[in-house]
Amino acid sequence: MEDKKDAFERLLHIMDDLRAQCPWDKKQTFESLRNLTIEETYELADAITKGDIPGIEEEIGDLLLHIVFYAKMGEETGAFNIKSAIDKLNAKLIHRHPHIYGDVVVKDEEEVKQNWERLKLKEGKKSVLAGVPSGLPAVIKAYRVQEKSGKVGFEWENKGQVWQKVEEELAELKQAELSGDQAHIAEEFGDVLFALINYARFINVDPESALESINQKFIRRFNYIEEKAGESFDGMGLEAMDALWNEAKSKGL
């Protein structure tokens, strides 16, 4: 434990030095760091998707730097500091885990999640969905709002009902296409995606991870086509490309 404390204290001291002496670090604000933090978060997500453990370690460090950076800027304005942020986090974790730090009894993970949402409402949240960031990618946001609303009872009883909803939305999309109304088509297409994401929850599939896995598979196979085709790539027809695609598939790419 002492080694961990020493490492964290050293990071805080380094942050003090950088903020005082480095022209780039001195110039940064909450706003200027925002996009960089998002980029670092995606780099961590990429490392997780690839199963790159050394990469995960490195990206966690990069994100920790950003957390310490924000805390240092908060300290400079007198608004908050790293201790106050950690103290609030500790208090929140203890309060939201009464089955660990209190006398509440839970039977499974689902009850833990339900209690978490109820406690958040008691803390002053105006909506169960209030904690879902507006800037989340759409697939993740859909998954989270469905998950959160489901925890308070707004949920289908079984996956068969959810699939019926998918089929209903697909039929409505087909009808919208016949109308030629592009706005209506887009709305119905969104309904199909939303229903499919809900179905993913019921079959224990993370839709964001599943889609990213397919993205990576497509990229690998398309890169194979490009490499095999070489200079003749620009003039290749679909049939030739498809043959190389199947070749890549047979190689497990």
Image (cartoon, helix red, strand yellow):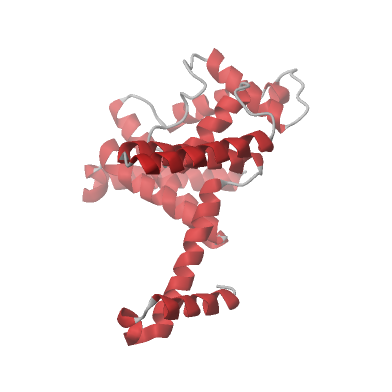
Q: In this view, does 168 lie to the left or right of 222?
A: right
Q: Is residue 38 left or right of residue 31?
A: right
Quadrant assignment, res 120: top right
Query: In the displayed structure, would residue 119 be above or below residue 203?
Result: above
Quadrant (top left/top right/bottom left/bottom right) for the N terminus: top right
In the image, 98 versus 167, the foreground residue is 167
Q: Horizontal and vertical percent for residue 36?
A: 33, 48
Q: In this view, does 33 lie to the left or right of 152?
A: left
In the image, 233 versus 205, the foreground residue is 233
In the image, 50 versus 87, the foreground residue is 50
Quadrant (top left/top right/bottom left/bottom right) for the C terminus: bottom right
Residue shown at 75% from the left, 31% from the top: 108
Q: Horizontal and vertical percent for residue 43?
A: 43, 54
Residue shown at 60% from the left, 18% from the top: 118
Q: Horizontal and vertical percent for residue 2?
A: 60, 44
In the image, 120 versus 248, the foreground residue is 248
Residue shown at 51% from the left, 48% from the top: 208
Q: Looking at this rendering, what residue extends furthest in the bottom direction? A: 231
Q: Can residue 146 be seen in this view?
A: yes
Query: In the displayed structure, would residue 135 be above or below residue 115?
Result: below
Q: Horizontal and vertical percent for residue 9?
A: 47, 43
